[in-house]
Amino acid sequence: MEAQVKDLLKEHSLRLTQGRADVISIFLNRNVAISHGDIESDVDGKYDRVTIYRTLKSFLEKGLIHKVLDDTGATRYALCSDGCSEVSHQHNHIHFKCQVCNETTCLDNVNIPDVNLPSGFKMSESNYLITGTCNKCS
């Protein structure tokens, strides 16, 4: 996994630091959308709140992660799929939040319905959240 972490940071023009490597490892191990608090718990005091915030901000700006809004209004973060960069995020996909385990998962292979906006409206980003029971909790 260490090589994968280094490659991800290099691909997104991010300098390798232990903090960044640790946070990326958390994303790779969890494979679901996670909150700032989840990361804080996982690093167990190794990094302060501000360091984690700045790391997430850098990852967002470079197209390594994207924000996932859930039904509680809490912000979570998930790794972007291939094709995201500093200038273009390709993360218009559906998110699924399980009402049993509360995990939010990116569903990259589910088609998003077309949305026809009224004249004069221009979409820059969309958030699709479906709630229900995930395949682990069914």
Image: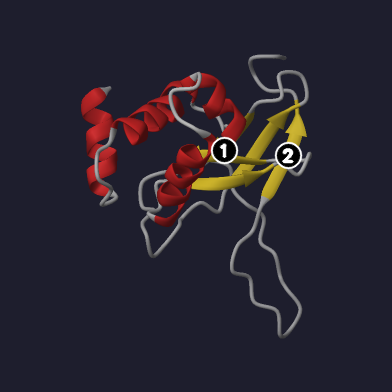
Q: Name the quadrant of the C terminus.
A: top right
Q: Which residue is mark 1?
A: 107
Callout 2 crowding tier (Cα within 10 Å): few <14, some 14–19, many ≥20:
some
Q: Which residue is mark 2?
A: 130
Instruction: Name the quadrant containing residue 29.
Output: top left
Q: In the structure shown, which secondary structural element does the residue marked by tag 1 occupy?
A: strand
* Residue nearest the viewer, comparing 105 with 56: 56
Q: Is residue 92 visible?
A: yes
Q: Is residue 32 above or below residue 54?
A: above
Instruction: Name the quadrant containing residue 20.
Output: top left
Which residue type does callout 1 highlight? Leu
Q: Residue at x 70, y 32 (%)?
A: 97
- Could you tell me residue 131's position as x and y percent? 76, 34
- Could you tell me residue 36's position as x and y percent? 58, 35
- Could you tell me residue 49's position as x and y percent? 54, 36
Label 2, label 1: how far apart the Cα atoms are: 10 Å
Q: In the structure shown, which secondary structural element does the residue marked by tag 2 occupy?
A: strand
- Could you tell me residue 33's position as x and y percent? 57, 33
* Residue nearest the viewer, comparing 112 with 62: 62
Q: Is residue 19 left or right of residue 132?
A: left
Which residue type does callout 2 highlight? Ile
Please say if the residues under marks 2 and 1 sit with CB atoms less than 8 Å apart.
yes
User: In terms of sequence position, does the residue under pointer 2 or pointer 1 come before the other?
Assistant: 1
